[in-house]
Amino acid sequence: MANAKQQVQALLFDVFGTVVDWRGSVIREMTAFGEGRGFKHDWAKFADEWRGLYQPGMEEVRSGRRGWTILDVLHRESLLVLLDRYGMTGLSEHEIKHLVTIWHRLDPWPDAVGGLTRLKTRYIIGTLSNGNIGLMTRMAKRARLPWDVVLGAEPARAYKPTPEAYLRNAEMLNLEPHELMLVAAHNSDLAAAARVGLRTAFVLRPDERPGQTIDLAASQDWDVVTTSFHGVADAMGVPLLRGIGRV
């Protein structure tokens, strides 16, 4: 850990599930949308099914079967599948766009903004997400996420967990892999980052999915294991800020 404190110059964050509550936010938005238009469905199930189409869509790109395609486009395509599945026909283009951009309006976990603000005083902080730049930028604007930089799959032209998704983002910051730390709530993401030399911080997010059976504990000896972004700051030796609580 001492070496990590001395060597790390930037912390990049997985976003969906680590920084923001994607599931609760999608349920909230779909409930409001449905109530206003007479649709009555299990919106928690809808949210889970939408997220369930996330990896298959990206795998088409990762495998080379499809050219580079940003996540907003993949989210739209999977949404259209679900709208048909749920019998939600007759929506206008404006309404479909509103639903696609739910992913731009996800709420942060309670510790996220304060913890990021604290880490920002000592380190470069930014995203290392599969979300595209426009999505991440609008999310940050709404949720007041104080990123120094928005990086991830789109500038790297590679979706996690391919090695290029991590290494190209380190290169864009003029950093060696060991000078970059990935912060994530998902062991598989951290494992892929560690394989190419990044430092790692696991943040437990047990409320990402009710009843989840994975990512409830660190699966390896990551550099940092904690329950909040303030825990990351503590581990990295960043002092508390006046007026910034730990929640």
Image (spheres, rainbow, N blue to C red):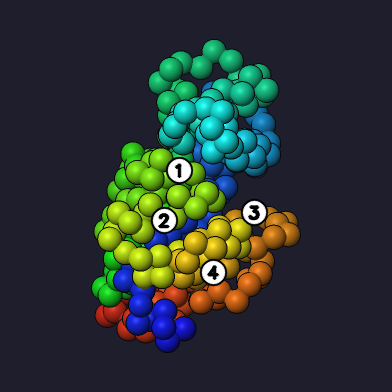
Q: How many marks?
A: 4
Q: Which residue is mark 2?
A: 167
Residue 156 in view here: yes
Q: Is residue 143 left or right of residue 52?
A: left
Q: Where residue 107 sits: x, y (%)?
A: 45, 51
Q: Where residue 219 sits: x, y (%)?
A: 66, 69
For label 4, the crowd category at 10 Å Cα-Cα, with few meaning under 14, some 14 to 19 and many 20 or more, is many
Residue furthest to the bottom in view is 2
Q: Which residue is mark 3?
A: 209
For label 2, the crowd category at 10 Å Cα-Cα, with few meaning under 14, some 14 to 19 and many 20 or more, is some
Q: Nearer the viewer, mark 2 or mark 4?
A: 2
Q: Which residue is mark 1?
A: 158
Would you say the residues marked 2 and 4 are in contact, meaning their CB atoms lie under 8 Å apart?
A: no
Q: Which residue is mark 4?
A: 202
What residue sits 63% from the left and 19% below the top? 84
Q: Nearer the viewer, mark 3 or mark 1?
A: 1
